[in-house]
Image: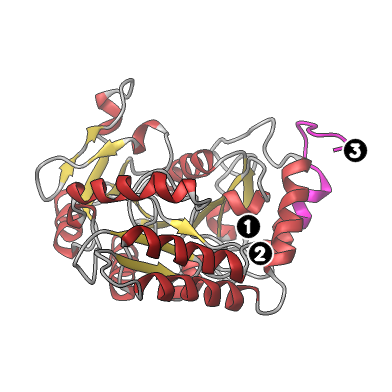
């Protein structure tokens, strides 16, 4: 910060953070930094449209991609629908370029491509959907999306603003070993400061101005404070056994909570991400499978836990994250607090 907080021009730190990411991630070759996850996704969508020359995008109910206009869209009533806006102020013309289908439904995706042949610029998905519960998808389904995109000249975007660097340094792409065409990151790559980025191959990224015709810029993009924090953060993440230890602690928490007698909840987890769901189901893979009525149990649990010093995200639809800073004592205390309340 003493060296300056923002210059509206590139700094060496951008190159250092980009090198740190790209040299440890075989799925991408070039990065462009922005100031938030929303901005990263918005720019990735524009890039996909510019690269393909198509307008329509396909997204999934239950995945969240920030608050840009064309993505604040929820599913309609049919199998394949133009969605309905989920916010005031979004014109219908924006909504009509966004196709919304259910997660984990191959038929809906196939029908969308049949109905809108040669019109879909990209499919965008959280490969680990973690903003509306933890809706873990099978690798086979993500591979299906990869294959149908390749077959139809459509780009596949993995929105890893949440999952990036949480299940491993290469995120969900590395976890499932599936290469998307564009990846978006945020949050962790700024070490607590506002940041985002989108990344792809040299071929696709060469379409961004000044090399290509897709415009994107931002005065605060790649600002040195966020870049410095990101370098410090990701250097920690690259230390030996960082992710092994993070997953071990997550598994300990999940196992401890699952052993509580008389519990009426299930835990779903991957890497350092976990979700507490009041359900009897052993799998929940789409938004429609979440029982809205079950949220009353979460509300009964939330405030008493807070009084015991255990802070969950303030919604039953939100997931939890283990961090390196959490101790064994933190985990034991959390399990004990849950056990007392469940009685």
Instruction: State the residue position of label 1.
Output: 30
Instruction: State the residue position of label 2.
Output: 22
Question: Is residue 300 among what the camera can see?
Answer: yes
The answer to whether the residues at label 2 and label 1 have Cβ atoms under 8 Å apart is yes
Corner quadrant of residue 149 = bottom left
CA–CA distance in space, label 3 to label 2:
26 Å
Q: Which residues are magenta?
A: 1-16
CA–CA distance in space, label 2 to label 1:
7 Å
- Indicate the position of residue 238 as horizontal and vertical percent values: 70, 70
Residue drawn at 50 percent across, 53 percent down: 310
- Indicate the position of residue 54 as horizontal and vertical percent values: 34, 44
Disc on the earlier residue, 3 or 1: 3
Disc on the earlier residue, 2 or 1: 2
Instruction: State the residue position of label 3.
Output: 3
Name the side, left or right, on which 87 lies relative to 102.
right
Residue drawn at 24 percent across, 64 percent down: 264
Name the side, left or right, on which 116 lies relative to 5.
left
CA–CA distance in space, label 3 to label 1:
27 Å
Name the side, left or right, on which 223 lies relative to 310.
right
Q: Nearer the viewer, residue 305 or 287?
A: 305
Q: Nearer the viewer, residue 321 or 41?
A: 321
């Amino acid at each position: 910060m003493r060296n300056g907080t923002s210059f509206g021009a590139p700094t060496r730190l951008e190159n250092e953070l980009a090198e740190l990411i790209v040299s440890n991630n075989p799925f991408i070759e070039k990065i462009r930094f922005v100031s938030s996850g929303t901005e990263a996704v918005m720019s990735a969508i524009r890039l996909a449209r510019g690269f393909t020359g198509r307008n329509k995008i396909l997204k999934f109910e239950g995945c969240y991609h920030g608050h840009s206009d064309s993505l604040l869209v929820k599913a309609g009533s049919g199998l394949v629908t133009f969605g309905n806006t989920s916010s005031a102020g979004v014109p219908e013309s924006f909504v009509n370029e966004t196709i919304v289908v259910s997660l984990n439904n191959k038929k809906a995706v196939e029908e969308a491509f049949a109905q809108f042949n040669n019109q879909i610029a990209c499919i965008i998905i959280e490969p680990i959907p973690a903003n509306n519960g933890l809706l873990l998808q099978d690798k086979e389904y993500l591979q299906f999306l990869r294959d149908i995109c390749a077959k139809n000249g459509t780009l596949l975007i993995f929105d890893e603003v949440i999952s990036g660097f949480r299940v491993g340094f290469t995120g969900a792409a590395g976890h499932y070993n599936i290469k998307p065409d564009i990846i978006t990151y945020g949050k962790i790559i700024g070490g607590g400061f506002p940041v985002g980025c989108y990344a792809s191959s040299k071929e696709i990224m060469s379409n961004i101005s000044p090399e290509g015709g897709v415009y994107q810029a931002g005065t605060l993009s790649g600002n040195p404070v966020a870049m410095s924090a990101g370098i410090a953060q990701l250097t920690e993440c690259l230390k030996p056994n960082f992710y092994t230890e993070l997953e071990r602690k997550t598994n300990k928490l999940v196992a401890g909570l699952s052993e509580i007698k008389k519990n009426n909840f299930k835990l779903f987890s991957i890497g350092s991400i976990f979700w507490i769901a009041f359900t009897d189901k052993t799998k929940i893979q789409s938004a429609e499978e979440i029982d809205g009525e079950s949220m009353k149990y979460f509300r009964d649990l939330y405030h008493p836990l807070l009084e015991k010093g255990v802070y969950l995200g303030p919604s039953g639809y939100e997931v939890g994250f283990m961090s390196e800073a959490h101790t064994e004592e933190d985990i034991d205390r959390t399990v004990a607090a849950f056990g007392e309340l469940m009685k």
